[in-house]
Image (spheres, grey):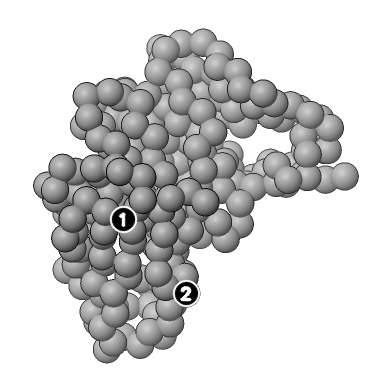
């Protein structure tokens, strides 16, 4: 148990659907992350919330919209996705601060398939 | 641009030793991480290097040379459960992690 949970674990959606991914961390961390993991590609950082400030990767399409209501919860709202968005979406958390050694703890991921 | 290179796939024999290399070019350096990811599971932390040299943790060791932009993960006494992908990641000057694509390690009996 890593202390980071994600729901749902699997999601199949059509291109016109709207869905949300949920992440919750029970580790008392103050930073949370969304990553996209495609086969044989590096993890792609999508969004970071650190001390309730959002750091956005400019290359993320607007059909992905994050929400962080508090330091323990993170959502990724999805709408009008494309088939190429099919991937494993990983949430992670860490204790942000001046120390460089801030290990990230990952959730099990949501396997998303867009038809 | 920032780049992390590691081999796509490696094969080793149970009981043997394997070394997985990682080279990086990043804007700044604030530490290098190795993670293990079993198929269908979350990545889990293995090791962290910020100074040059070898960090040993049981059967796993990680080495760093900052001047060469190079690290390796050494796995000894390989077990079948070590079959997984191994991800190298570097924290850049903005304290963001830059990830490699991972090395899939296949262990054969």
Mark number, residue A34: 1
**Closer to the camera, B52 or A82?**
B52
Name the image quarter holding the N terminus of chain B.
top left
Q: Residue at x 64, y 47 (%)?
A: B84
- Mark 2: few, some, or many residues within 10 Å (few <14, many ≥20)? some
Give the alpha-carbon distance from disc 2 to disc 1, as whole Å: 16 Å
Q: Residue at x 26, y 59 (%)?
A: A73
Kind of element beneath mark 2: strand
Q: Is residue A50 above or below residue A102?
A: below
Name the image quarter holding the C terminus of chain B.
top right
Residue B88, horizontal then vertical, whole percent: 48, 36
Residue A28, horizontal then vertical, whole percent: 30, 43
Q: Residue at x 29, y 36 (%)?
A: A95
Where residue B94 sits, quadrant-wise, is top left
Kind of element beneath mark 1: strand
**Closer to the camera, A100 or B75?**
A100
Where residue A16 sits, quadrant-wise, is bottom left
Residue A105, horizontal then vertical, whole percent: 41, 44
- Mark 1: few, some, or many residues within 10 Å (few <14, many ≥20)? many
Instruction: List the residue tagged with mark 2.
Output: A10
């Amino acid at each position: 148990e890593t202390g980071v949970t994600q729901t749902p674990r699997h999601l199949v959606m059509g291109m016109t659907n709207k869905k949300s991914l949920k992440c919750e961390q029970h580790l008392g961390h103050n930073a949370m992350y969304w990553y996209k993991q495609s086969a044989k590609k590096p993890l792609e950082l999508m969004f970071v919330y650190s001390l309730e400030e959002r750091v956005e990767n400019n290359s993320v399409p607007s059909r992905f919209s994050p929400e962080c209501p508090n330091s323990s919860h993170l959502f990724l709202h999805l709408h009008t996705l494309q088939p190429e968005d099919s991937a494993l979406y990983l949430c992670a958390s860490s204790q942000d601060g001046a120390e460089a050694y801030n290990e990230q703890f990952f959730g099990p991921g949501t396997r998303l398939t867009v038809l | 641009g920032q780049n992390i290179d590691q081999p796509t796939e490696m094969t080793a024999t149970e009981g043997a030793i394997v070394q997985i290399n990682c080279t990086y070019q990043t804007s700044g350096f604030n530490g290098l991480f190795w993670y293990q990811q079993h198929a269908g599971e979350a990545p889990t932390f293995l090791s962290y290097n910020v100074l040059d040299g070898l960090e040993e943790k049981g059967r796993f060791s990680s080495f760093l040379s900052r001047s060469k932009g190079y690290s390796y993960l050494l796995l000894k006494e390989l077990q079948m459960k070590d079959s997984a992908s191994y991800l190298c990641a570097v924290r850049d000057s903005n304290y963001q992690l830059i990830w490699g694509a991972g090395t899939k390690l296949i262990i054969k009996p």
